[in-house]
Image (cartoon, helix red, strand yellow):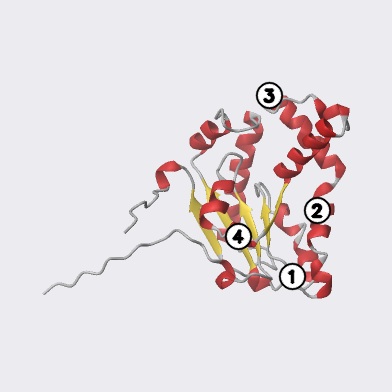
Amino acid sequence: MYSFREFLTEKQIVLGKGAKYGQIVFLAGGAGSGKGFATKHFLEGTKFKIRDVDEMKKAFLKLAAMKNKYPEIRELDLRKPKDVFKLHMFVKNKGVKDKSLNMMLTQAKVGKLPNIMFDITMKDKGDITEVLPQLLEVGYNSRDVHIVWVLTNYYIAVEQNKAPSRGRIVPDDILLKTHEGAAGTMWNFVTSGTPRGVDGSVHVILGGKKHTVFWNNPE
């Protein structure tokens, strides 16, 4: 006699057993890899404060348009790779990455450690090591620091980067560097270990439409 058991495997990554506080995740992947999609569908993204430089760029563009500020970026067209690069350098020179992290950590000063997701390319390990000391200093435990890599076929990322629905186009040379850099950094982690202070879980999400199948059967 044979017995059969039906089961559904969901591609849900539950970090820190679903804790609402105290978790850090570095979400890595080259430009156009689909990290936003992964956050929404696979990572319980609503539980995290997300530090995403791309969102900061959008905010500056809105300020430029609505408040008549920052004339140097007011007329930029993010479908043009050169303009994308100009905006990137503008935001970098403003130093808003550090300021945004300080704001996110204001709750930590009173003993409440928010879940934070760092949306990065991880083209080099500095994307992680530059902020780790500050995170550990305010009280995060290294066992609650995780890495999730959205690994997407480079040719798929190229197509997604140029899709009409995408608001900006990353220059080709930078697109390639982000994917090569992320792969190189992850390989170093595999062969040499993750940086000191990262002792949580490490996951890989295979990006691209062919790796995602939605189950719509109401039963």
Q: Secondary structure at mark 1?
A: loop
Q: Residue at x 59, y 42 (%)?
A: 180
Alpha carbon distance from label 4 to label 2: 20 Å
Q: Secondary structure at mark 2?
A: helix
Q: Secondary structure at mark 3?
A: loop
Residue 152: image location, x then y, percent:
50, 44
Please tell me which of labels 3 and 4 falls first in the chain. Answer: 3
Please tell me which of labels 2 and 1 falls first in the chain. Answer: 2
Residue 39: image location, x then y, percent:
57, 53
Front of the two marks 3 and 4: 3
Quadrant containing the C terminus in the rendered view? bottom left
Who is closer to the viewer here, 15 or 202? 15
Instruction: Kindly identify the amino acid type of the residue bearing the numbered disc 4.
Output: Ile
Q: Label 3 belongs to which residue?
A: 80
Q: Residue at x 61, y 47 (%)?
A: 182
Q: Is residue 15 shown above or below 55? A: below
Q: Secondary structure at mark 4?
A: strand
Q: Is residue 171 shown above or below 47? A: above
Please tell me which of labels 4 and 1 falls first in the chain. Answer: 1
Alpha carbon distance from label 2 to label 1: 15 Å
Residue 100 tag number? 2
Task: Check disc 4: other Cα within 10 Å, few if <14, some if 14-19, many if 20+.
Answer: many
Classify residue 181 as left or right of residue 53.
Answer: left
Quadrant containing the N terminus in the rendered view? bottom left
Residue 200, image quadrant? bottom right
Task: Check disc 1: other Cα within 10 Å, few if <14, some if 14-19, many if 20+.
Answer: many
Residue 72: image location, x then y, percent:
86, 27
Q: Label 1 belongs to which residue?
A: 113
Please tell me which of labels 3 and 2 falls first in the chain. Answer: 3
Q: Label 4 belongs to which residue?
A: 147
Q: Residue at x 58, y 39 (%)?
A: 32
